[in-house]
Image (cartoon, rainbow, N blue to C red):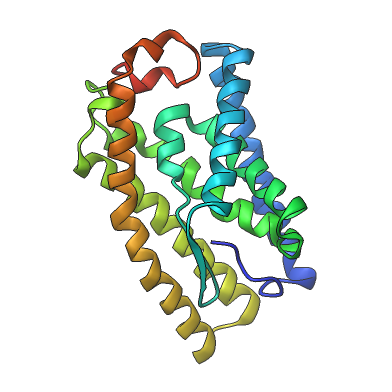
């Protein structure tokens, strides 16, 4: 979902700096809460795992330019379910930065735009999880419908932010509308596939319950709220 360089530029980038700072600040608040509930070593390990995962999702898994951006299998809900919201946020940010620094330097000017696009939907599903997910059920016991809710909100949020940045940066024109529509249509594939990937990963985690006390996975994965 990398916004193409030049879509937002000049003075308009100030909004991207502001939104990215807000998302980072809220992520830091969640990080402190996570560390208080677990410990700093556990949090750091999960954040590093999320970083490696993000890099693999962006660089190794299939991705292709469509319309105003690129279609990626971000698997943000997978990171959230396995590792927790704050480690996932750190991983998405660091993975994006590492990719930009060493593999796609042309994306760096759009870093704050892309960070906002990744983090705000993640923080949204984190805030809504208690209302959307059965609280008497561990994440490893979720079904397709449950996971589809999270994935739909996350990926829908990504598409919504991509559309916002495109219209904000380039204006509402026929060309922009076509590019956004093309991108959004292509992302429907991701919305359908990602819950299947989530369930596959959760099934693997369910068969490895011995990891419950390792600190390498979020406590909510194996425990009801």
* 191 with respect to 114 (left or right): left
- Percent from the top left, x then y, of residue 145? 20, 44
What residue do we see at 60% from left, 82% from top? 171
Q: Can residue 68 be seen in this view?
A: yes
Asked which quadrant contains residue 204, the reply is top left
Tally of numbered tags? 0
Q: Which x, y percent locates residue 38?
A: 53, 12
Q: Position of residue 2 (x, y in %)?
A: 59, 62
Determine the residue positioned at 52% across, 62% down: 161
Q: Which residue lies furthest to the front in this view?
A: 60
- Residue 173 visible: no
> In this orientation, which residue lies closer to the viewer: 28 or 221?
221
Q: Position of residue 179 (x, y in %)?
A: 49, 81
> Measured along the vertical axis of the image, is residue 79 above or below residue 17?
above
Residue, x 62% and y 36% (percent of image)? 90
**138 on left or right of 18:** left
Q: Between residues 116 and 96, which one lies in front from this camera angle?
A: 96
Q: Which residue lies furthest to the right in this view?
A: 10
Q: Is residue 62 above or below residue 205?
A: below
Tell me where residue 166 sits by quadrant. bottom right
Q: In which quarter of the image is the C terminus?
A: top left
Name the residue: 67% across, 41% down.
94
């Amino acid at each position: 979902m990398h916004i193409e360089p030049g879509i937002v530029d000049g003075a308009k980038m100030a909004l991207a700096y502001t939104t990215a700072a807000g998302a980072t600040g809220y992520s830091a608040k969640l990080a402190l809460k996570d560390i208080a509930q677990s410990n700093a070593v556990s949090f750091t390990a999960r954040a590093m795992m999320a970083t490696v995962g993000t890099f693999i999702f962006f660089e190794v898994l299939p991705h292709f330019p469509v319309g105003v951006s690129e279609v990626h299998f971000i698997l943000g809900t997978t990171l959230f379910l396995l590792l927790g919201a704050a480690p996932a946020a750190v991983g998405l940010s660091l993975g994006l930065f590492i990719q930009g620094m060493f593999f796609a330097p042309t994306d760096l000017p759009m870093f704050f735009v892309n960070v906002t696009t990744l983090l705000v939907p993640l923080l949204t599903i984190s805030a809504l999880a208690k209302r959307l997910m059965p609280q008497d059920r561990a994440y490893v016991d979720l079904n397709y419908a449950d996971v589809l809710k999270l994935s739909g909100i996350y990926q829908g949020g990504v598409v919504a932010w991509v559309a916002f940045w495109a219209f904000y940066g380039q204006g509402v024109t026929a060309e922009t509308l076509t590019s956004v529509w093309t991108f959004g249509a292509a992302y429907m594939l991701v919305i359908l596939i990602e819950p299947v990937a989530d369930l596959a990963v959760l099934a693997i985690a369910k068969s490895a319950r011995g990891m419950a006390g390792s600190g390498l996975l979020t406590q909510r994965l194996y425990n009801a709220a």
